[in-house]
Structure formats: structure tokens, C-alpha cells
Image (cartoon, rainbow, N blue to C red):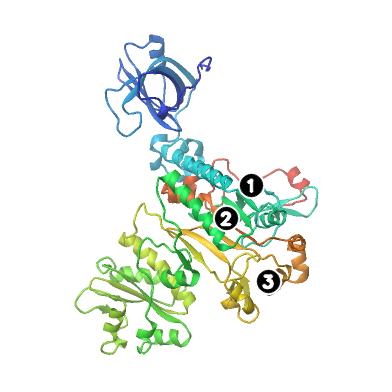
């Protein structure tokens, strides 16, 4: 095996000059073409590929060494950049090649479990087991580099705007924040545990009390919850907090960041200020508090139109204070047959709806699932209200709004994907504002905080805290892009009495408040400036900007659905001594 000796890299592979000069490059061998008297090697590093060429004018010892090279060998080469006979328009260096004069094999590689350059066709389990090999692929390399660019733009932008980067602890006190904590047992304090932070929420508020009026951190967060395509047990968020501000200041700062980010990493100009929707409007129009606004198919309320229809499903919903709403799938009749609509019905039931009424307009007379209950003119009135046309499918749900809206919201997305009407390479950003402060828990017959308990209610809602919790809205805001929540934030309560009152409204005893949040309440007694902040998920942002389908594609070493990591086989058992030191025993 060769050593580097006096050779030092002068250029990355895809960054060599495209004019004659001498360069030194190094990397992994992606492909070898041995034509007998000619050898071509595609050399790959994190920037891309360059072709190395060996021919009759190559030193024989160098040529023989090249003939023994295999895929994924790590090599270093010195040579002259010259024009390439067979141009490759797919890569930046496709017009040139390096005529090698010196070659070093730095590390040999045995046959890999899969071909790195063709890893997209390999099953996920194998790729995750050999993640370090899959990370060599162009797609994953570019995704990781995108995360790096996002992190760099983040720091540049917020540093320029007067933010101070401060690290907060990784081992903290367990506090209720909505998800299950990952716990760390203490060796020194028997029977006691640290928690890994779900977010740095309390610490960043204390930093405001401490006088660091603009804080930023690329914070690692941990939540012990079931995984899905856009969720991992550990994630990174751009975490920030600002003092002496209100909602408008924070939204303006966030919009400025997104504008800068899109320009620098995608070359796109986004228009600011971004659109805003109240939570109520988002739910009524899209059936979701994270709506995908790249397409229409908005939910329409037809309660007034059908309130006198003699159909028990509609009547009972209206009498119970619910509503009857619909979406129109334009030109959907050719796609959604009766059998396909039955599948949508089962999906609706899975969400909580009792069923799904429909109108499928194929022939001159529409096929209506509740036609026998309609009087003359009532079907025409429904079609007119919905601006439906021949060829459309109408899907209708009747129930309480908390069932109707999310059901139609989910069906809206399913139908849009099936009809292929969601534009590609389009980024729709908007703020969702004025969230409900409380949500009713049917199991406990009590009101829970929809967000964390430090959230400030809107000033005009303060009189209703005790008398009408359902109508209390919060100084909360979410940033949504293409149907995915990127960011969540709020203004914080800084009044000690109001904070204590909110804790009590949430059913917390004085002892419980003291035990869980006493240090924060105590801090506020020494003067707390008005402040608020937000946390923006880098992982989800990178996933969207890379066009990836899964968070795993933008993480270096991700977990799978059961929260295990296949490459290192973690979590894993530990020996008895470690457990004994932590005062822990395993119950089989």
C-alpha cells in the first residue's frame, strides 16, 4: 500500500480547472474501463467525478498499477488536465481528463455488498446496514451537503442580525412537553434520572431573563415517539428566542431567513411578507393546520344548501351542531370508479367518519349515493353551490367539525396525489396564526394546552380564560411549506401570576407546579422582558429542499421505524456491571 508521501491534493475532483495545468486529486474509484492499451478510471469525491486516463505515454509502472485497481479503492493521482475525446455532458469535468503521471493506492477495497453508483436499486435494510457506503452515492452526498449549506446560511444570517449562539444542556430535568422523554439514569444520584431535551424551551426563556436578548442554536432534540417518514427520535432544529419583541418582529425575522436561504441554496426568490391564515381558516378551507396550498380543491360548506334534505345523515349532523362539507375532485369521474370510492370510504372511516356520501357525474344524470332522499331540484342546488361539472366527483362528509374537517383534509391530499395535480418544484410557504390555546380531552373531560404551557394568549382572549376556554386563541405561529410544518413558535408568558393561573387551568397543583417549573417561575420574579421565539426543523427543511421522500435521506446515520440503527445495531444490551452502577435491573 502506498503512502501519500510528498503528494498533497491541489483540487477536488469536480473543481479542477478546465484548462491545461498539473493537478493532484484523490478519492474513491467509481468505475474502471480497461481497454487493453488504454485505461480510464472515474474518480469520485464529495464534489463529483473526474476521469483519469492512462495510455501509451503513461509510465509503465504507473500503467501496471492502474490495471490492478478495483472499484472503491482509495487512490491519489498527479497528472495534467487535457481535453477529453469523448465528452460527458452530465458532469462538470466532462470536457477534460487527467493524464496521470503518478499514482498511489492508499487503500484497497474488497467487493462491496452493493454497487455504490447504483445504490438506489438496493433494498433499504442493506443500505442502512452499510450506511457509510450508501453515503458515498451522489444523491446522499448532495443531501448531506445541502444540510451543511442550510446550517451555514443559518449561522451567517442570524449572526448578522445580532444573535448570539449559546449551547444549552443535553441532560436536563424531565418536564412535560407533549411527547415521551428519553431518560438517562444517574449513577451518582440513585433512582433519579436526567431527560434528553425535547427542545431547549425553558433554557432559552431563562436566557432571555439573563439578558441575552437574541439567542440562536442549532439544537439537538429528542422525543421517544413512534416514527414515520417525516419524524426521527432525534432531530435538529434552528432554535431562537428574542426579547423586547412581539409576534410581528419574530415573523419578519423568520421570513428574512427563509428569503435568504432560498436565494443562497436554491437560487430562488420568494416573495415576502408570506401569506397568513388563521388556524380556523386553514381548517375550514383545507382541513389541516398544515395545508398544502400548491393546489385548490378546497373544502366547501354546504350545510345551508342541504339543511332541509330528508337524509338522516345530514339532518343528524346539523342537529348535533355539526356541518355538511364537500370537496370537488375535478375530472375525477374517470379515475374514481365506485370501487375506488369505496376505498376512500374505508379510509374516511379509519379517520373517524361514519361514512362518505358522493356524487359521481359521468352521464347526463349524476350518480348520487343519496339520490333517493332528494326532492326535485335539491341535487341541482348542491351541484350549483359546488360549481361542479360533468366529469367531476364530489365527496361529502357530515358530522361534527372535528371529524368532518380532518377527514376531508386527508381525502383532499389523497385525491390530489392520485389525480397528479400537485405541482413539482414549487414551494408554497405560509404562516398559520391564532391557534387555539386549549384543546378538549374527551378521555379526561378536561382542557389541555394545545402547545406548551408558557404560551401567551392573545390579549383580547384573556377575559375568557376561565369562562370560555374554547374561544381562547394563542400568540402562536407555525410556518408551513407544501403541507409540512417546518416551524412552530409563540410569544411567552412573562407575568408570574398569569403563568401560575395557566398552570392551574391545566389541572396542575401548586406542588406539581413547584416541582416541575419552580425554577422558571422563580426566575420570572426577578424581571423578565417580553420575549418569544421559534424552532425550525432543519431535517424537514432539508428533506423538502432536496426533494427527498423520507427524513432518512437527509441524515447521515438515521434510525428506522422501531428507532434502531442498523449499521451499529443499537440500541444494544449492556453488561451487568454497567446496570449495577446505575442501580438498574432488567425485568424479563
- Residue 141: percent from left, percent from top: 46, 38
> To which residue does mark 1 refer?
164
Position of residue 249 measured from the top left corner of the image (x, y, whole percent): 56, 59
Q: Badge 2 local density, few (<14 within 10 Å), some, or many (20+)?
A: many
Q: Distance between the residues labelled 2 and 1?
A: 15 Å
**Residue displayed at 68% across by 71% down:** 502
| Circle 3 residue | 502
Which residue sits at x=76%, y=48%?
582
Marks 1 and 3 sit apart, C-alpha to C-alpha, by 31 Å
Q: Is residue 172 above or below residue 375?
A: above
Label 3 residue SS: helix
- Dots 2 and 3: beta carbons under 8 Å? no
Tell me whether the residue at label 1 lies in contact with that at label 3, contact meaning CB atoms closer than 8 angstroms.
Answer: no
Q: Which of marks 2 and 1 is nearer the N terminus?
A: 1
Report the side of 116 relative to 364 (left or right): right
Q: As displayed, is residue 557 above or below residue 425?
A: above
Distance between mark 2 and mark 3 Cα atoms: 22 Å
Residue 39: name its quadrant. top left
Residue nearest the viewer, comparing 325 with 533: 533
Among numbered discs 2 and 3, the one appearing first in the sequence: 3
Q: What residue is pinned by disc 2?
A: 535
* Coordinates of residue 227 in the picture (x, y in percent): 53, 55
Q: Which marked residue is nearer to the observer: mark 2 or mark 1?
A: 1
Amino acid at each position: 500500500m502506498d503512502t501519500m508521501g510528498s503528494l498533497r491534493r491541489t483540487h477536488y475532483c469536480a473543481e479542477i480547472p478546465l484548462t491545461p495545468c498539473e493537478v493532484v486529486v484523490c478519492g474513491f474509484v467509481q468505475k474502471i474501463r480497461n481497454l487493453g492499451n488504454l485505461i480510464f478510471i472515474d474518480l469520485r469525491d464529495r464534489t463529483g467525478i473526474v476521469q483519469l486516463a492512462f495510455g501509451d505515454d503513461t509510465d509503465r509502472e504507473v500503467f501496471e498499477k492502474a490495471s490492478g485497481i478495483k472499484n472503491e479503492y482509495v487512490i491519489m493521482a498527479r497528472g495534467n488536465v487535457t481535453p477529453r475525446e469523448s465528452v460527458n455532458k452530465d458532469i462538470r469535468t466532462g470536457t477534460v481528463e487527467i493524464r496521470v503521471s503518478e499514482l498511489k493506492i492508499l487503500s484497497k477495497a474488497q467487493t462491496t455488498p452493493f454497487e455504490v453508483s447504483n445504490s438506489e436499486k438496493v433494498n433499504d435494510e442493506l443500505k442502512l446496514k452499510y450506511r457509510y457506503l450508501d453515503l458515498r452515492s451522489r444523491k446522499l452526498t448532495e443531501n448531506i451537503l445541502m444540510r451543511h449549506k442550510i446550517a451555514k446560511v443559518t449561522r451567517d444570517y442570524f449572526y448578522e442580525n445580532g444573535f448570539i449562539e449559546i449551547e444549552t444542556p443535553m441532560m436536563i430535568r424531565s418536564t412535560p412537553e407533549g411527547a415521551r422523554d428519553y431518560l438517562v439514569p444517574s449513577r451518582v444520584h440513585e433512582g433519579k434520572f436526567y431527560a434528553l431535551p425535547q427542545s431547549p424551551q425553558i433554557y432559552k426563556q431563562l436566557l432571555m431573563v439573563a439578558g441575552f436578548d437574541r439567542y440562536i442554536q442549532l439544537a439537538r432534540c429528542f422525543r421517544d415517539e413512534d416514527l414515520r417518514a417525516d419524524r426521527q427520535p432525534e432531530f435538529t432544529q434552528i432554535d431562537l428566542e428574542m426579547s423586547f419583541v412581539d409576534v410581528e418582529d419574530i415573523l419578519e425575522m423568520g421570513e428574512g431567513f427563509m428569503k435568504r436561504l432560498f436565494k443562497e441554496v436554491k437560487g430562488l426568490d420568494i416573495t415576502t411578507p408570506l401569506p397568513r391564515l388563521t388556524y380556523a381558516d386553514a381548517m375550514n378551507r383545507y382541513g389541516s393546520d398544515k395545508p398544502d396550498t400548491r393546489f385548490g380543491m378546497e373544502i366547501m360548506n354546504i350545510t345551508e344548501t342541504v339543511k332541509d334534505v330528508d337524509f338522516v345523515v345530514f339532518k343528524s349532523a346539523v342537529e348535533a351542531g355539526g356541518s355538511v362539507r364537500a370537496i370537488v375532485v375535478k375530472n375525477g369521474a374517470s379515475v374514481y370508479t365506485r370501487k375506488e370510492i369505496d376505498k376512500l370510504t374505508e379510509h374516511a372511516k379509519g379517520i373517524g367518519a361514519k361514512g362518505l356520501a358522493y356524487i359521481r357525474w359521468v352521464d347526463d344524470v349524476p350518480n348520487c349515493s343519496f339520490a333517493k332522499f332528494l326532492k326535485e331540484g335539491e341535487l341541482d342546488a348542491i351541484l350549483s353551490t359546488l360549481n361542479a361539472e360533468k366529469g367531476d366527483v364530489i365527496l361529502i362528509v357530515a358530522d361534527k367539525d372535528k371529524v368532518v374537517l380532518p377527514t376531508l383534509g386527508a381525502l383532499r391530499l389523497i385525491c390530489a396525489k392520485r389525480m397528479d395535480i400537485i405541482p413539482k418544484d414549487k414551494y408554497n410557504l405560509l404562516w398559520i396564526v391564532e391557534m387555539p390555546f386549549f384543546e378538549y380531552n374527551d378521555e379526561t373531560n378536561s382542557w389541555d394546552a394545545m402547545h406548551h404551557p408558557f404560551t401567551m394568549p392573545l390579549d383580547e382572549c384573556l377575559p375568557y380564560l376561565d369562562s370560555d376556554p374554547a374561544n381562547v386563541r394563542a400568540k402562536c405561529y407555525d410556518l408551513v411549506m407544501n403541507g409540512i410544518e417546518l416551524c412552530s413558535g409563540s410569544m411567552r408568558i412573562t407575568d408570574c401570576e398569569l403563568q401560575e393561573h395557566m398552570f392551574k387551568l391545566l389541572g396542575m397543583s401548586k406542588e406539581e407546579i413547584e416541582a416541575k417549573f419552580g425554577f422558571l417561575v422563580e426566575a420570572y420574579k426577578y424581571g423578565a422582558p417580553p420575549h418569544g421565539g421559534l424552532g425550525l426543523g432543519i431535517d424537514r427543511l432539508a428533506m423538502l429542499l432536496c426533494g427527498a421522500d423520507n427524513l432518512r435521506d437527509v441524515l447521515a446515520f438515521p434510525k428506522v421505524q422501531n428507532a434502531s440503527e442498523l449499521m451499529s445495531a443499537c440500541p444494544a444490551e449492556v453488561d451487568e456491571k454497567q446496570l449495577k452502577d446505575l442501580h438498574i435491573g432488567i425485568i424479563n
